[in-house]
Amino acid sequence: MKKVLLFSLTVIIVSVLLSSCNQSSKNKEMVKKENFGVHKGKDVFLFTLKNKAGNVLKLTNFGARVTWIEVPDRAGNKENITFGYDTFEGMIKGDPYFGSVVGRYANRIAKGKFTLDGVEYSLPINNGANSLHGGPEGWHSVVWDAEVPSDSDFPTVKFTYKSPDMEAGYPGNMNVEATYTWNDNNEIVINYKCTTDKNTVINITNHAYFNLHGAGNGDILDHQVVINADRFVPVDSGLIPTGELRPVAGTPFDFTKPHTVGERINEKDEQLILGGGYDHTFILNSPRTVDASVYDAVSGRYMEVISDQPGVQFYTGNFLDGTQTGHGGKKYIYRSGLCLETGHYPDSPNQQDFPSTTLKAGETFTSQTIYRFSVK
Ligand code: BGC
């Protein structure tokens, strides 16, 4: 009897071990890792993630970027729908933000200054009079560490970076994680986690550009957009918030019902003129629901954005001018890509009435954003 019990126990243990082994090798099999380049002495890799649907997501640890999202159209034809470069050299020379994780503070901080606990901090100025996206050497421009976790059911890559105290002017040693999972529902699930040893500020996002016709295939003016936001954040000529939170009702900023990007973008609206188009944060009505969506009636591709963050920056590629040549030699022309960058509002450290972006020493910041792809 004892022997039988011992035997069954051994069988159970061995099969559990074997299945966990299969599990761990499963994620590794679904993620291919290749050398992509070397930057400042650190290896840069290209990760190719394939989900059960056979769709491909490519990531790199340079800036913890998304560089390729290949999803089918209504007829099943697959095409990459995000901006990026075929080579690391192209990436280094190209636009710094395509697909990157942006931090320590995504979007603008007025005049590159903020005060925390009575101390004034100065940040690099890289956008007119202001600091944009963590300065020129923000997290988009560094080589992150990367691991392929063994305990994931779906292709997953976890990027980590140790941002030293006073890097780009921000206080506190910060440990940051950005984990991408490409699940079988064609969702890119991005989980962020940050900790600090001194009080600091944090606003982290992903800066992917999307064109559902396929990246480099014309503009996005016919894309139908919905943003579940009753208010947005008006800006001044430097794209710094005025402090007002303005209702979208009756303005070209009302995307609570579907409108194409191009329908109202050239109206003589003060905010559209200041932004050169849409380049504004929308205040999400109920984060964690479908906060925004984009539909391309031509291809049938549909993208939904779900986040736990209070806002989303809707940017319509108004500064693109065709000088960037991306994947397959395609040019990224004026308004040929749109961004939906989830996060806090711009310049929050200087705006008392905005939700706080302070992260206290010893506390942990987490957030999640999902980009879900399907067809209609
Ligand atoms: C900003 C744009 C800026 C772009 C740079 C966006 O987040 O809102 O004003 O030009 O990033 O890629």
Image: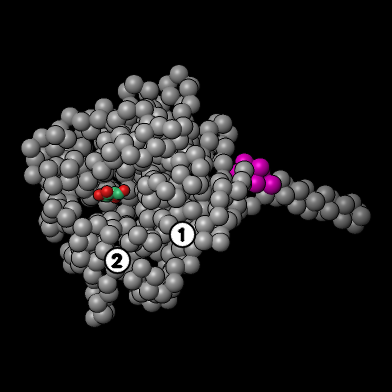
Residue density around tag 1, few if under 14, some if 14–19, many if 20 or more, within 10 Å: some
Proximity of marks 2 and 1: CB atoms separated by less than 8 Å: no
Instruction: Find the residue positioned furthest to the bottom.
Output: 118
- Magenta highlight range: 25-31
| Residue 187 against residue 164 in the figure, above or below | above
Say which mark, if any, is on residue 142.
1
| Residue 291 against residue 39 in the figure, above or below | above
| Left or right side of 87 for 22 | right
Colour basis: one colour
| Residue 94 against residue 72 in the figure, above or below | below
| Left or right side of 288 for 352 | left
Q: Is residue 178 visible?
A: yes
Whether residue 330 appears in magenta in the rendering, the answer is no
Label 2 to label 1, Cα distance in Å?
Answer: 16 Å
Mark 1 beta carbon near ligand 1 (under 8 Å):
no
Label 1 amino acid? Val
Label 2 amino acid? Pro
Q: Residue 3's spot in the image, x, y percent? A: 92, 55
Mark 1, secondary structure of its residue = loop
Which residue occupies 36% across, 27% down? 217
Quarter of the image for the C terminus: give it: top left
Q: Is residue 354 visible?
A: no
Q: Nearer the viewer, residue 356 or 81?
A: 81
The residue pinned by badge 2 equals 124
Which residue occupies 42% across, 57% down? 141
Which residue occupies 49% across, 53% down? 62
| Left or right side of 15 for 270 | left
Q: How many marks?
A: 2
